[in-house]
Image (tube, rainbow, N blue to C red):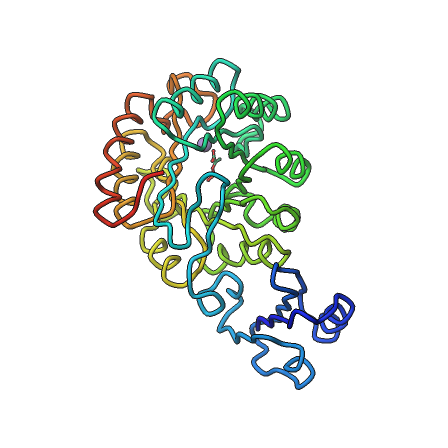
Amino acid sequence: MVIELKKNVSKEQAELLSKTYNAILFKEQEGFVLVTSSKQKEITAELEQAAKKVTVTSSDIQLAGKEYVSTKRTIDFGNFSIGGNTKNTLVITGPCSVENETQINQSAELCVSLGVKVLRAGAYKPRTSPYSFQGLGLDGLKLLADVRAKYGLKIITEVKDFSHVNEVIEYSDIIQVGAKAMYDQGILRACSQTQKPILIKRGFGSTLQEFVQAAEFVLSGGNPNVILCERGIRTFETKTRFTLDLCGISWLKEYTNLPVVIDPSHAMGFAYGVSDLCRAAVAMGVDGVLIETHPTPKVAQSDAEQQLNFEQFTSLYHSLKPIAQAVRYNIV
Ligand code: PEP
Ligand code: MN
């Protein structure tokens, strides 16, 4: 149950109610909000008196659900936004990992040349093997900060574990919570303490319910700026790296109020399928796409097989506009 308290309810009163009813308390612009378990269906007279609006929810998809907010949330990036009524499909691209200054500058130049506003690259990489390249860490974040200053791009980079979450929040414009980190509640709670947008990737073994509940950890801590990213789930199929869950995208659009971004690169795992998948996702009307690109994919230190070279990406990028327009979206 979501209980939006009246504006005149003080912090002390709100805290007392939160304790009495075992509810999470956070503050929104409009006032305090209490969230109880969705199993609670009835409200006491005391709560009713303090409440401006009460939403009974059918599952613990509460703040992220359409039952609570029936329209899609807007995520504002300053000079552009996604979600809400914008019908914008944001293109995000960059290499899997920041590898060196030249590589990240080349990637930034690709963005600038096409008008792509958001550069993505990982500094802390959640590799499956401890013997693989683990990312440049803080040095990588510093390279990204330099590129942001030089090219005026927004930066998205991932947090892999709790040890560097605050560092990533400090350096990044958008914080990516990786598929393997989706269940880390320390990370999610830390991300709830900023107002920067948080892009949560779906764990490859996560149900849609679990995925959206990860978002609830961020929303219920007071950060309303959450984006969901479908990046493929594990199925019985082994020919492709994962399986992009297009049904899931429709479900998220129907039942949640959060913008949805699609990552076809990690789903496919091979460059040859990324453009087709990306176009299919854009045709569904989504809030963004995240595509891995590298100046020389062959020598990439992570995810080499799936990264598009600049020529492939440029051709994909130009093909997206008419597809987005056909479903009344704009590429931004
Ligand atoms: C990545 O974005 O480079 C990455 C490792 O993705 P995921 O968390 O989806 O596996
Ligand atoms: Mn990658």
The x and y percentages for residue 260 are 41, 50
Q: Position of residue 45 (x, y in %)?
A: 66, 86
Q: Along the line of sight, which residue is nearer the eye, 129 or 59? A: 59
Residue 295 in view (yes/no): yes
Q: Is residue 109 above or below residue 184?
A: above
Q: Is residue 207 visible?
A: no
> Looking at the image, which residue sits at the far top?
102
The location of residue 281, given as percent across then percent down, is 30, 45
The answer to which quarter of the image holds residue 289 is top left
Compare residues 255 and 181 and report the one nearer the observer: 255
Instruction: Assign the C terminus to one quadrant of the image.
Output: top left
Q: Residue 18: percent from the left, percent from the top? A: 71, 70
Q: Nearer the viewer, residue 318 or 261?
A: 318
Relative to residue 118, is residue 262 depicted above or below?
A: below
Please indicate whether residue 163 sits to the left or right of residue 249 in the image: right
Q: Is residue 175 above or below residue 95?
A: below
At horizontal 53% and vertical 33% (from top left) the residue drawn is 157
Q: Quadrant of residue 273?
A: top left
Relative to 6, say whether 324 is above or below. above
Q: Is residue 267 left or right of residue 134?
A: left
Can you name the residue that lies furthest to the bottom here? 45
What residue sits 29% from the left and 47% below the top?
329
Left or right of 318? Residue 32 is right
Q: How many numbered circles are shown?
A: 0
Q: Quadrant of the N terminus?
A: bottom right
Quarter where residue 232 is shown? top left
Nearest the viewer among 110 and 242 is 110
Identify the residue at horizontal 42%, vertical 62% (top origin): 71
Left or right, 17 with reference to 157: right
